[in-house]
Amino acid sequence: MKYFYYSGCSLEGTALEYDISTRAVMQALGVELIELDDWTCCGASAAEAVSELLSMVLPARNLALAARMDQDCDFVIPCSACYLNLRKVDEHLDRDEGLREKINAVLQEEELSYKGGIKSRHLLDVLATDIGAEMIKAKVNRKLSGLRIAPYYGCQALRPYGGYDDPEEPRCMEPLIEALGAEVHPWPMGAKCCGAGLMTTKKEIALELTGELLKAAKGADCIATVCPMCQMNLDSYQKKVSQVKGEDLRISVLYLPQLIGMAFGLNAEALKLDLNMAYTDSLRTKLKN
Amino acid sequence: MSEETRELSEGHAEEDLMAAIRENIKACMQCGTCTGSCGSAYAMDFTPRQMWRMVQLGMVDEIFNSRTFSLCSSCYYCTLRCPRGLPLTESIHGLKQLAVAKGVAEKKGARFYQTFLDTVRRYGRVREMELMARYFIAMKSPVLPLSFTPLGMKLMMKGKVSPEMPQFFRPGKLDGIFRKVKELEARS
Amino acid sequence: MRKKIGSALVVGAGISGIRSALDLAELGYQVKLIDRAPNLGGTLTQLDYQFPSDHCGMCKMLPLVERDSSSQYCLRKGLFHQNIEIMLNTELVEMEGEPGKFEVTLRQRPAVVDPELCIGCGECSRVCPVEVADEFNAGLAKRKAVYLPVPHNIPNNYVVDLDSCTMCGECEKICPTGAIDFRWEARSQFKILVVDDELIVRDSLKDWLIEEGFDVDTAESGPAALEKIAKQPYHLMLLDIKMPEMDGVEVLQRAKDMRPELPVVMMTAYATVETAVEAMKIGALDYLMKPFDPDTLVPLVVKLYENLERAGELKMEVGAVILAAGFGSFDPAGNGLNTYGYGEIPNVVTSIEFERIVSASGPSQGKLVRPSDGKEIRKIAWLQCVGSRDMHADADYCSSICCMFSVKEALLAKERSNGQVEAAIFYMDMRTFGKDFQRYRDEAEKTYGVRFQRSRVHSVEQKELGGDPRIVYTDITGTGREEIFDLVVLAAGQRPPAGSDVLAETTGVELNQWGFCQLKPFSLSLTSQDGVYVAGSFSGLRDISESVIQASSASLRASGLIHSKGGGLAEASESKVAFRDVSREPPQVMVALCTCGDTFTQAVQIKEVESFVSNLDSVSHVHRFGSICTQEGWNQLEQAMEASGANRLLIGSCMPYLYTRKLRDLGANIGLNPALMEVVDIRSSVFPGNNSSQEQASREIRLALSMGVGKLKGMDPSVSTGTPIAQKGLVVGGGIAGMTSALGIAEHGFEVFLVEKTEELGGNLRHLYRTLEGNSPQELLEQTISKVQRHPNIHLHMNSRVLHSHGRVGRFITTIEKEDGSGETLEHGVTILATGGKEATTESYGYGQSDIIVTQHQLEEQLHSGQIDPAELGVVAMIQCVDSREEPRNYCSRICCSSALKNALYLKEQNPEIDIYILYRDIMAYGFLETYYTQARQAGVIFIQYDVDDKPKVNIENGRVSAAVTDPILGREVVVETDLLVLSTGIAPEGQGKLAEIFGVETNQDGFFQEAEYKWRPVDFLREGVFTCGMSHSPRNITESIAMAEATAQRALRILASERLTAGSTVAEVRYSLCSLCEKCIEACPYGARWRDEDEEKIMVDELSCQGCGSCAAVCPNSASVLRGYRDQQIFSVIDAALEEIF
Amino acid sequence: MATTVKIPIKDQNLVSSLQDFFKAMLRDGGINGLMVAQHLPTKNSVMPTLVTDPDKLDTADPLAPVFPINAAKVVSKLTRKPLGGKVAVVLRPCEIRAFIELVKLKQGRVDDVVLIGMDCLGAYSNVQYPDFAGDNGMEATLRFYRNIQEGKGTACDGFDVSPACKACEHPIPENADVLIGLVGVDLKDHLLAKANTPRGEELLENLGLSSTSEPEKRGKEIEKLVTERLSYRDQMFVETSEATADVGKLVSYLGNCVNCYNCRVACPVCYCKECVFLTDVFDHEPSQYLRWAKRKGILKMPTDTVFFHLTRIAHMSTACIGCGQCSNACPNNIPVMELFRTMAHYTQTAFDYVAGRSLEDDPPLSVFREDEFQEVVAKSH
């Protein structure tokens, strides 16, 4: 198995541990990740707020880079926003011939072109569908027994482009969590919104949404995430949210690959657990035992 | 903020964009599913359904006086659930674009987007710390950075952001692409 | 009665199929009625209550004349008609030939349980180890693999569901009558060739299959296998894919060349699944996945065997085919977007499941408790448009029936709980477009307190996991709300029936974009394939009333085809069987006891029973027969009866209902009226599990027999001769409905008088120029008029009106008057009233005060005449429901929304720059009309909903017209300055009252004709022989009027087709010497079959209208009114016989 | 407003004053005949008479406390078909109510009659009345009313009105065209005549009587009277229910029945031309009797006695107006009225029906309401 790997900007910065743990876990699973040296930002949510065409061109440029490499494989993308943007290109190309021409006219600036056809897949999709719980279970050598994990999917990993799971009631993370020897914290919030970029622009709303999530996660030892934006909203504002909600809502929030890595027996350094903002002592203790 | 990015957003023919949005949501039957699905609806002055109605009835001024579209977190629930299959989140983005173009977008949001894209244009990728710094400068607000200080400090302590600004590429990495986009959009 | 040749196939035995089959059978055609399911009745078997009566009433479809040819009990329990042969578990697999002469191939799934032998004791089900979800209870309960498909069927025999059966054989062992037969011995004739290169696979498969009784041969390679195949035929080949030398796919190809009919099943490992799928494309039947496990492999092979060998195939010739395949239901969990948590969240159910919850035959015996935890239900939400009007579910259509279905369910819940349940219906548009629907809805809201919440609910959540369902929704003002319910009912929309694509391919009919049967313009029954007609929801979901109409429309078309091909009604009369007149003989009863092999004699003291019976009064002969259910036994019985000279026959056996048809034949053979024969059940007393002692069983049997004798002894033996029929029809009204009716009758060779009051045919259709679907009404009109005018059987009476009519079904005498005052008297056997309706006029919204305020009708006229030029219009506003859907005209006119959509779309097409505003209450874009509503919005028409308590206000100033309306979404007033204001005033009745008086029929409170029964007899009047169609019955569009007209013609033909009509053997009569003329019986008669003859001073009974219900006999204090076959003396004898054994 | 007039009482003689009134009515009331009860020349019998000559009213006495038959039956005979004239009929409330039931059963028509009803204080039984009346019936009538006016009630000289009358809660003929009022009226001075219908007004308008209004105390006295009767009635219901509580008790309650069918003949609402019990339906085979006897070894003869009464209850209890003629007619003193009234009370209550109240009320069994008696017609399959 091999994939083009698009880490995206966040994974070079605030979500470094997501990047490193993803690579570590993929390596452990024998999955080859093909890097694109010249990749650029997908436009995040900013491009679409400014220019429709730009919001297509920025991700298309990366697809074009991959297309140039002439390898028969899909993209795997850990960041949900990047995933959405890359995938959007193909979804639109199929429907809109005019757009295809425009995009290519712009890409021509860099002597690139993209005709479509490279599948952009979310890391979660690849883990759940291609690799699967069986294969993961086979690599587990340090079961996360007694751990109760709340699977958090967020929005853009599921919507509007899903296909690999129910966009309202996603379940695909559950067999993976169980494969690690952990227990699934049943909650109805897996697909709810964390507030995303509103944390920057409309903080009070984002805090409200995050608060609801953290409240529902009570009883779990840890929330598993698959998106740097979700991770940041969930782990970095816990103090503030606790103040707003008037209760202690602190809880560990880890990237799913970090949890998988732990069960694979990878050490904390390999998974950059030290970079996590919310990796509570109680979880640490629990894991030690 | 660079002039180039600003021009980029002004390159649109505003009416075309508004017409496109109206076209998008023409088939709306006012069922209210979007509003019911929206996590931010409670904080909006007009609900999404009301806003689509206003689009239908051409109440442009009221739309851009409202803060409704700026509260969208792009969770795509409304798009997913709209029984008519209308591209609602996309249409919200359209309204955001229009607001930026009209210069009526709430300062905070619009500036953020433009700053962000400016970074992308220059460096190809985004470094959050640099972005923040540029954003605060663009907002010309001495107070705003303070509300992010705790996070910044935390991040810095974790070594996730460094005060230095490593250069991935030469500055002006995506100038060509941005220029071309602007050119094409002006034409349409 | 005339004997007709010709036969038809009806596919699907739901309401529509049964209606079509009965229609054709009543005309004398032989009908084959098939259904894929193991039971009759389709969806209706699951529904106990129909709105608006909240009762069932299905039996009202049964024949009203010539009743003896059909069963007369509950139709949900079963159906018998002498001209209908029912085949269940059967599918149409092939159709060849041409209209009028199709050769069809029917495949019946194997019946493991012989229905002739099954006595319904249930032992098999008791021992069956398999438990699966019960479809009848919509999965809310469990059933076994051998089970009763519908608990209330008669006869009710068990069936084996081979898909879940493990073939353990326990049921076969326990069955007391040997009705269950897996026919193991036949397996030895079934040769299986196992081809695999691995010895271990070959050997183990061989062992397993031989153990199951099959004949197994093996081959170790492809070439070896081919050699064997060349030598001798096999019934099945199990073929490995991966073999050296020659792989399975190649073997398959070659084998198929040699023996194309050989069924092949591929055996594959995981890696080669794709190859296996490929193999299926080139002719493999199926594939099996390695590694094998005997527990899964063996049943698979057995199932294949059952389907291959035991499925009976029947080829037959039919003149026409009616597809009544019904509908499927949207699976809320099935499309990957399970927003309602169906199947995930407990207590989220579908409408059908709810129907089972409230059903007395359902899992909770009708108690209003939750299936998940038995908790009492106190608060219910109905969510409308689940899988309808939803692009995500690929459904840009409305499912038409769910609105009323939910209202009905809400009322049922209210009733079941004495009003304690809180019922809320969440909807977008409440589509109350049918006759009386609006009042039903209003009553639900005002009288019973059902809450109507205009809001589309996007999803159902749980309060906590496993908790009560929670609904988050936005009310009309935009306020977000949250409510917890005990139960959420999803009004799941329609889908095409399962297998519809295959059926369409087999029969060559086209499907529409959503997979429903595509109809021809202006018809509800013509498909793209001549000779194949559609009835019921296969062409889009319909309520019962419309399905019944459509089914009759289909049967008229089918009959018309068969008739035109020379089958039909023109054949010579067949003399009716003359029964021996035994009225002067004393009753002599022959009692025939079936001993069911030996089982019966072992269980009771048969001698003692015999001697008891022979001592009964009037019993002349007693005979024992081994098994009269066999042909041989029956022949013996027939001979014995003939030899005995007895004039009554009592059979003691099992399953009395099985004998209806046999008794008729017996009667014909020996010339004895079958009414003088009776079958009583003497078998259930000795069923296994009944645990009754021999003495007790004997007593019960004596009781049954002596009651039977008692009844027979008092039976009136006189034979009815029938009433002569005037074989002509009268149609009043020359609009499209009247003309269609007249043509329907005329084309079957009968004369029709068509009376039209104006000088022109065509009625309202003359002023319609377009339909929403883009068809041309004028073309239709021209063609129809030309056919009517040219038809030799149609006698036109233009400028004429009906003055007077008397007489009754079979013979009416009607006087008509021409414009010049001259009169004419017409004699006819049936009457069809099709006088139409008219656009209502109004004084609302400034109508009449400005030239630019027009009705929809005027708009269409003026667009046609050029008086209105779309190019000159800037803004157009339309107001719907003008004076409608509120008292006094509290009904929906059904066509106004489509008219508005039609005219709006036309205006937009002519001039896209026009701003069009449609102010509406609920858009009645039912069925596939929804897509035009979508189109109108896409075209930019703006729809603004208004409330009846806050109607739009029209302002006229200086020739300018504006309409102000509160937009409920923005909560503020929107003022539309308009160049044209169009009012949808709806349809009003036109002169029905006078005609109703003349023909002795009823009108409803709105002045439209009142049908006998909205759902089951939608085109009949209570008065037999008078029918109604078109807008004189209720507002409806052209196509719907035509279908209804066809249905009336069908109903009329049923009467006209015979020279004489015979009443049933069970009819009421009056003993005049006792009658005090109190007329209670007239009031009591539900069929209007009685009247007082003032000249004779007698109460008269119309034998053809009388349905033998006995209400008159019950209400008559001194038995002056009696029911033939149920005289007091008879009943006394029966009671005496019963008491004799009990006390 | 209804016309109310005074019928003056001369010489303190109620009976002769009424006779004058009837004579005037027959002369000037626009009617062709008058049906009223009269003392017949035969000793002590009071029977309805159809009078066309005003001079033949000298023994008319509708107030006599006796009614040997319920006159509804004869009014029905008069009105089954067009009569060829208009007749006023003077009836007791129970007779009017019976007649209304018969009209509903198409056994009579109201077109040709004017119903004149009298406040009814009850009647003695057919057996007792001759003893009470002695030689002078009309004098006896005056005695009866004097007794009442003196506050001594209806019991007089050791006789009292029948149980049916004591239990009758309908003493006032509210549904008559013309009502002749006694209760709460100053009988020393006048009687009340009130026209309730146009037809009644027509009758009264030419008689030159002075108009008046109902005295205030009339309402109260009626209420008092009805209350007394209701309490008697309800006590009767309790006792009868107890006495017939099971099959055994019922059999002994009716034990003396000899199948004479007098009760049926006397019953005004039993309208069948021929009773089913006289038809071939009950013409049992002789051998049947033996079989019945065999069942328990003993068979009471005649058979079908209880069955007869039950059948009559089934047929007629919804129409029973409680006149008590059945008991009056019974030769063996079976309390038939008590049984019928009790059963009728239950059936009529069940259907929310009051027999004889109004022509507007449809008889219960001619109306089918889908929602009634759910406990009986429960929707199960």
Image (cartoon, coloured by chain):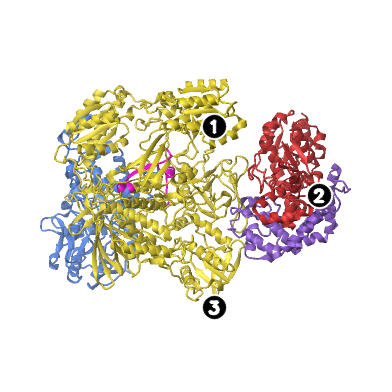
Chain colours: A red, B purple, C yellow, D blue
Going by the numbered disc 1, the residue's amino acid type is Tyr
**How far from the left and from the top, in percent, is residue A71?**
73, 41
Q: Nearer the viewer, residue C145 or D342?
A: C145
Please indicate whether residue C482 sits to the left or right of residue D284 in the image: right
Which chain does tag 3 point to?
C
- The residue segment tinted magenta is C24-51
Which chain does tag 2 point to?
B
Q: Residue C287 carries which label?
A: 1
Please indicate whether residue B6 sits to the left or right of residue C285 in the image: right
Q: Quadrant of residue C1094?
A: bottom left
- Secondary structure under the numbered disc 3 in the rendered image: loop
Q: Mark 2 points at which residue?
A: B125
- Secondary structure under the numbered disc 2 in the rendered image: loop
Q: Quadrant of residue D141?
A: bottom left
Q: Dot 2 surroundings within 10 Å: few (below 14), some, or many (20 or more)?
A: many
Asked if the residues shown at circle 2 and circle 3 are in contact, with their CB atoms under 8 angstroms apart, the answer is: no
Q: Which callout, 3 or 1, points at the residue further toward the start of the chain?
A: 1
Q: Nearer the viewer, residue C1131 or C81?
A: C81
Mark 1 vs mark 2: in front: 1
Mark 2 vs mark 3: in front: 2
| Spatial CA span between label 3 and label 1 | 78 Å
Residue C37 on the magenta segment: yes
Q: Mark 3 points at which residue?
A: C959
